[in-house]
């Protein structure tokens, strides 16, 4: 390894979780990745488990291929994209390229853009055509379920400022995604906003939307503990669709018109149909979910009946600086969202806890 600078001795081997196929994740000893010119080696401090990691473990067709979609995972690969770590080695030119020094704590956007496709060249890097994301593409972007991780020359990295609460760093990535979704909704001061799904993403969206000061901010979820937390974090009102007709309640609050903005962050097909029904004419539907199966809706609602703006939201373009600032300044709180830390060796328990979603909202693996 031709490092320009290192922080102490770098070991040859490390522990990592390796994804071989659905249901086959293994804790193994593997080589510590080598870094070349303009590359960075991180010693992982922690990596959150995403709902996408759980779906990958269970073989979701959208991720492994199916329903007309190409396979996205290229095994064997180390999962994990919600990571932070300390810079322990720099290749030639890496410090100048990424603005990082040995000893810095840093996070990286989940996408590793190619820098050459039409989207990257237009500054739309988050829609990069090859679309390598940490934890899905072997060699290009092994992920953070490991002791060390290589940031290649194309990664988009951010130094965490002095005094940043490192225990909250795994939430930078989900919050960055939430900020992008809220931005897509173009929330106005007199809007009635509904956010469906109070998981880690939805709770970040809720707090970001609160900063927009809409007229009424409504959280929807079937879990009472998450609704209670949503209320604590800024929701004006909470609705449990298992106990109440969401559409009827929202129509009653809006003189029968419906909400102005509906953000879908639950991943459940029923919540998508619910959103189309709850929106007023000319409303805005923002989709940020990974589904396990296709969703069938009456498209005439979107066009002929309501002329809705249907907006996709993917990843976290240009939002990491805001996410870092919101967490550091306490504008967004994540203390009760990150509910558990587990050692890397207990990754299966972490996946199970995230799948159940009962008491735990965000589980972080700590090497």
Image (spheres, grey):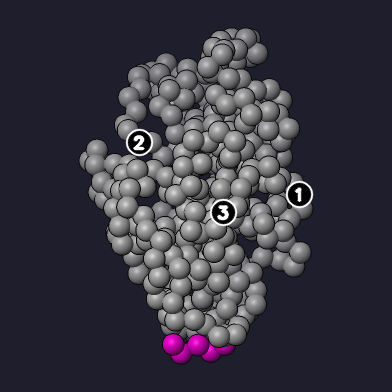
Residue at 56% over, 48% down: 363
Task: Write down the residue under mark 2.
Answer: 292
Total marks shown come to: 3
Q: Nearer the viewer, residue 345 or 126?
A: 345
- The circle drawn on residue 61 is none
Residue 181 occupies which quadrant of the picture?
A: top right
Q: Main SS type for the magenta part?
A: loop
Residue 189 within the magenta-colored segment of the rendering: no
Task: Write down the residue under mark 1.
Answer: 330
Labelled pair 3, 2 in contact (Cβ < 8 Å):
no
- The circle drawn on residue 342 is 3
- Return the x and y of residue 135 as percentages of the image width and height: 41, 59
Q: Is residue 123 visible?
A: no
Report the magenta residues as a range.
1-5
* Mark sitting earlier along the chain (3/2): 2
Tag nearer the camera, 1 or 3: 3
Report the quarter where the C terminus lies.
Answer: bottom right
Residue at 35% over, 19% down: 298
Residue 361 occupies which quadrant of the picture?
A: top right
* Mark sitting earlier along the chain (1/3): 1
Q: Nearer the viewer, residue 138 or 114?
A: 138
* Mark sitting earlier along the chain (2/1): 2
């Amino acid at each position: 390894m031709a490092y320009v600078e290192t922080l102490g001795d770098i070991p040859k081997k490390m522990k990592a979780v390796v994804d071989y196929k659905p249901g086959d994740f293994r804790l193994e000893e593997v080589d510590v990745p080598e870094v070349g010119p303009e590359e960075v080696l991180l010693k992982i401090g922690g990596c959150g488990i995403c709902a996408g990691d759980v779906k990958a473990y269970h073989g979701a067709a959208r991720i492994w291929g199916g329903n007309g979609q190409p396979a996205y995972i290229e095994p064997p690969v180390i999962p994990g994209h919600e990571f932070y770590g300390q810079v322990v080695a720099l290749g030639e030119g890496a410090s100048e390229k990424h603005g990082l020094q040995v000893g810095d704590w840093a996070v990286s956007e989940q996408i590793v853009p190619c820098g050459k496709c039409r989207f990257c060249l237009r500054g739309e890097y988050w829609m990069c055509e090859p679309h390598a994301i940490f934890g899905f593409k072997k060699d290009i972007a092994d992920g953070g379920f490991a002791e060390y991780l290589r940031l290649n020359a194309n990664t988009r990295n951010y130094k965490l400022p002095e005094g940043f609460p490192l225990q909250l760093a795994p939430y930078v990535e989900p919050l960055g995604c939430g900020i992008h979704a809220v931005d897509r909704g173009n929330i106005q001061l007199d809007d009635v906003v509904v956010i469906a799904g109070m998981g880690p993403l939805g709770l970040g969206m809720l707090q970001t939307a609160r900063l927009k000061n809409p007229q009424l901010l409504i959280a929807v979820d079937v879990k009472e503990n998450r609704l209670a937390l949503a209320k604590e974090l800024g929701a004006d009102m909470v609705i449990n669709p298992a106990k109440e007709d969401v559409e009827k309640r929202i129509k009653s609050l809006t003189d029968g018109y419906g909400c102005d903005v509906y953000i879908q962050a639950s991943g459940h097909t029923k919540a998508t149909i619910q959103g189309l029904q709850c929106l007023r004419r000319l409303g805005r539907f923002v989709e940020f979910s990974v589904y396990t199966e296709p969703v069938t809706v009456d498209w005439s609602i979107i066009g002929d009946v309501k002329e809705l703006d249907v907006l996709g939201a993917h990843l976290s373009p240009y939002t990491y600086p805001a996410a870092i600032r919101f967490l550091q300044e306490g504008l967004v709180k994540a203390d009760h969202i990150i509910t558990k830390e587990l050692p890397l060796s207990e990754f299966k328990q972490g996946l199970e806890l995230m799948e159940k979603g009962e008491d735990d909202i965000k589980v972080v693996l700590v090497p």
